[in-house]
């Protein structure tokens, strides 16, 4: 470089040039040495991630801006660094396995200004989080979270596309995936987490956030080049009640007002060499704050006979079906006969504004359920329960209600997130389960509050009542993407199964896209400690063979094994409870034949009860065959699936 040019640079960019000269670089590797994080701290703080020689995330700036003008992550001065590592296991009582291994290397960087960053490298991913140690409250104007990719990679993105009340941060968090390149993402659109980026070679990266407490959730939007960066809902300043719930009228010029001493959410990139690794990943459990509930003995996972999806449409009874005591006694009788743990009384049982104004004798139903060993869960809007959460939880707990399905949240700004953590604690204080429906995508809350036994945040079976979409393709995408964030209240179990050509939306007699075995396989594949039987009891009794099979599948497991799969194409998973294994396979609209290697079974012989698509399932999606054979771990089974098909099995050890 000529001296005159060097002098000009020094004059124009003195601060950035000097900072660059003093920037420090830190390296952190995963325990197996395959994943590396590089952190540069100077004028900016950047992080980058590699898997072997493949660049997963290029250097990307990260920072937090406070309202006093201080920017955490700009022109930094490092006070000290603290390396650490861990290799531990912890119990997970309501999960797809009973224990999770937490093995990582960690680097904590403390900066002048009473804040810092923690970086972790796992064998399957990388994560970082800010922390602050400031007095009093702080106001966060914005957070800069960037994910720069080397190439114009293809990605699976769920977009917030049903903005409610003309507020782009008011959304149901339900969307099919757009499979597009980063460059094809429209400016100013918001994708909610998790999202998947196909790095190639054959790496895939899933972007997540974990331990989201008292802070808004992160969306991603495109920037310059192959950049995705975080966007956060500003804090609401004025709300109104729209229909049956809160909506935001105005928002502040900042995203959070919070305690000055705290840790912020983890920003996470999970990396896989095989798609199936994503379908059995524990990152969310590892990074979530441990349980706030010391005694979890009262938390009972299980299955639920659900009323709303089937429109209370029972028949061959001597009473008019609907939101009344005889109908719910009928649901309880069905649940008891099939050893289901719960029924839900969904919307319509109360004034949607005031849960104290019941249109139904809830106590009589709860008492009847108690006689039959069936618990009752009540539906509520977020607005209705937050009007008096302490009083309402205490009241219904005294009545014997087992939990609440809380609906129409439709937001994850700081107020909404803080409210849901508060509700989880208040519910736990009253020994009540919580199913967060109508918005909420989990981010580790299930570990922190195990009574939050399920969350929606998925475009589940309810959408079959009113829309025609590629549901089978979505069904075989979410185990690799959405399910990484935690359990999902997809609500499977429809018995009116339809081929692609025959399907149509019908509200009172809803169909499902794909075959009967596609539905049966969901009970093993989809994580849901609280799992619905969504169709009506009458049709389940007509289809008792299928009902017996799904009723016997547990909702939590001792061990899991992702056997095979490709995002958007097919998925194959096995799970173990006691000595019995359960397996499920689903395909998209393409018929498919795969081979299932039974080596996961271990020693001994097993009685295999298998449900597979029938010879005519491509024309009649309800067609299936059931067979019982004896197998061992040395066997390999052919799995043949029709269009939109599936395969499900139970392996019971016999010796």
Image: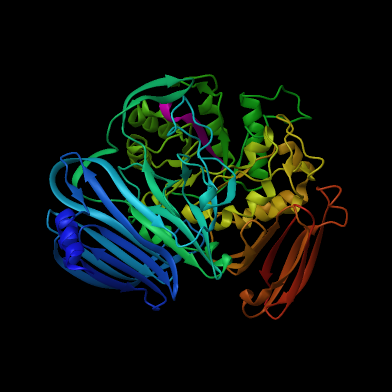
Q: Quadrant of residue 517?
A: bottom right
Residue at point 32%, 62% (across, down): 47
Figure check: 649 above or below 478 = below
Q: Is residue 401 visible?
A: yes
Q: Quadrant of residue 238?
A: top left
* Side of 156 where 110 appears, left or right: left
Please state which of residues 200 and 238 is positioned toward the viewer in this rendering.
Answer: 200
Residue at point 60%, 54% (across, down): 477
Location of residue 500 in the rendering, given as x and y in whole percent from the top left corner = 78, 45
Residue at point 19%, 57% (across, down): 16
Location of residue 244 in the rendering, given as x and y in whole percent from the top left corner = 48, 22
On whether residue 375 falls in the magenta region, the answer is yes
Please state which of residues 621 and 158 is positioned toward the viewer in this rendering.
Answer: 158
Location of residue 593 in the rendering, given as x and y in whole percent from the top left corner = 77, 65
Please state the total of marks drawn on the protein image. Answer: 0
Residue at point 67%, 32% (across, down): 466
- Image quadrant holding the N terminus, namely bottom left
Q: Is residue 110 visible?
A: no
* Side of 452 where 573 appears, left or right: right
Q: Magenta stretch: give its range.
A: 373-384
Location of residue 28 in the rendering, given as x and y in whole percent from the top left corner = 31, 72
Colour scheme employed for the rendering of this structure: rainbow
* Side of 183 where 636 appears, left or right: right
Please state which of residues 357 and 116 is positioned toward the viewer in this rendering.
Answer: 116
- Image quadrant holding the C terminus, namely bottom right
């Amino acid at each position: 470089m000529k001296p005159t040019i060097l002098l000009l640079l020094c004059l124009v960019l003195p601060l950035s040039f000097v900072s660059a000269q003093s920037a420090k670089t830190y390296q952190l590797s995963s325990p197996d040495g395959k994943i590396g994080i590089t952190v540069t701290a100077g004028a900016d703080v950047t992080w980058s991630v590699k898997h072997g020689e493949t660049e997963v995330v290029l250097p990307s700036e990260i920072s937090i801006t406070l309202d006093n003008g201080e920017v955490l992550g700009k022109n930094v001065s490092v006070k000290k660094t603290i390396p650490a590592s861990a290799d531990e296991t912890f119990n997970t009582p309501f999960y797809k396995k009973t224990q999770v291994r937490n093995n990582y290397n960690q680097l904590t960087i403390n900066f002048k200004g009473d804040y810092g960053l923690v970086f972790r490298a796992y064998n399957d991913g990388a994560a970082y989080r800010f922390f602050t140690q400031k007095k009093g409250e702080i106001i966060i104007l914005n957070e800069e979270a960037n994910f720069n990719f080397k190439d114009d990679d293809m990605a699976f993105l769920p977009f917030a596309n049903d903005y409610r009340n003309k507020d782009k941060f008011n959304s149901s968090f339900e969307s099919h995936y757009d499979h597009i390149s980063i460059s094809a993402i429209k400016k100013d659109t918001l994708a909610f987490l998790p999202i998947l980026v196909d790095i190639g070679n054959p790496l895939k990266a899933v972007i997540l956030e974990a331990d989201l407490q008292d802070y808004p959730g992160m969306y991603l939007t495109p920037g310059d080049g192959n950049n995705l960066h975080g966007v956060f809902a500003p804090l609401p300043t004025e709300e109104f009640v729209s229909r049956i719930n809160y909506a935001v009228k105005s928002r502040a010029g900042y995203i959070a007002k919070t305690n000055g001493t705290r840790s912020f959410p983890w920003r996470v990139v999970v990396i896989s060499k095989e798609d199936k690794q994503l379908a059995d990943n524990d990152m969310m459990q590892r990074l979530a704050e441990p349980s706030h509930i010391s005694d979890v003995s009262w938390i009972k996972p299980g299955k639920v006979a659900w009323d709303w999806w089937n429109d209370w449409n029972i028949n061959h009874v001597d009473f008019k079906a609907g939101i009344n005591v005889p109908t719910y006694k009928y649901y309880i009788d069905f649940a008891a006969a099939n050893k289901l743990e719960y029924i839900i009384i969904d919307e319509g049982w109360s004034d949607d504004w005031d849960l104290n104004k019941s249109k139904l004798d809830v106590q009589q139903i709860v008492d009847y359920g108690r006689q039959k060993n069936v618990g009752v869960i009540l539906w509520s809007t977020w607005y209705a329960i937050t009007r008096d959460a302490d009083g309402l939880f205490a009241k219904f707990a005294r009545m014997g209600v087992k939990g609440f399905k809380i609906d129409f949240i439709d937001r994850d700004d700081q107020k909404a997130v803080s409210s849901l953590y508060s509700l989880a604690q208040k519910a736990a204080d009253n020994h009540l389960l919580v199913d967060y429906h109508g918005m909420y995508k989990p981010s580790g809350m299930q570990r922190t509050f195990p009574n939050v036994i399920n969350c929606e945040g998925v475009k589940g079976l309810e959408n079959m009542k009113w829309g025609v979409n590629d549901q089978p393709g979505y069904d075989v995408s979410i185990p690799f993407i959405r399910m990484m964030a935690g359990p999902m209240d997809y609500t499977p179990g429809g018995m009116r199964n339809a081929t692609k050509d025959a399907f149509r939306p019908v509200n009172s007699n809803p169909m499902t896209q794909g075959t009967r075995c596609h539905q049966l396989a969901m009970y093993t594949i989809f994580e849901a400690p609280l799992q619905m039987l969504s169709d009506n009891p009458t049709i389940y009794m007509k289809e008792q063979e299928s009902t017996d099979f799904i009723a016997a599948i547990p909702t939590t497991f001792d061990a899991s094994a992702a056997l095979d799969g490709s995002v958007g194409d097919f998925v194959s998973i096995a799970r173990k409870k006691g000595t019995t294994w359960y397996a499920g396979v689903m395909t998209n609209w393409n018929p498919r034949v795969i081979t299932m290697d039974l080596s996961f079974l271990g020693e001994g012989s097993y009685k295999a009860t298998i449900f597979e698509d029938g010879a005519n399932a491509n024309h009649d999606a309800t067609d299936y065959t059931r067979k019982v054979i004896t197998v061992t771990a040395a066997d390999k089974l052919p799995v043949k699936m029709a269009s939109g098909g599936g395969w499900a099995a139970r392996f019971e050890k016999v010796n």
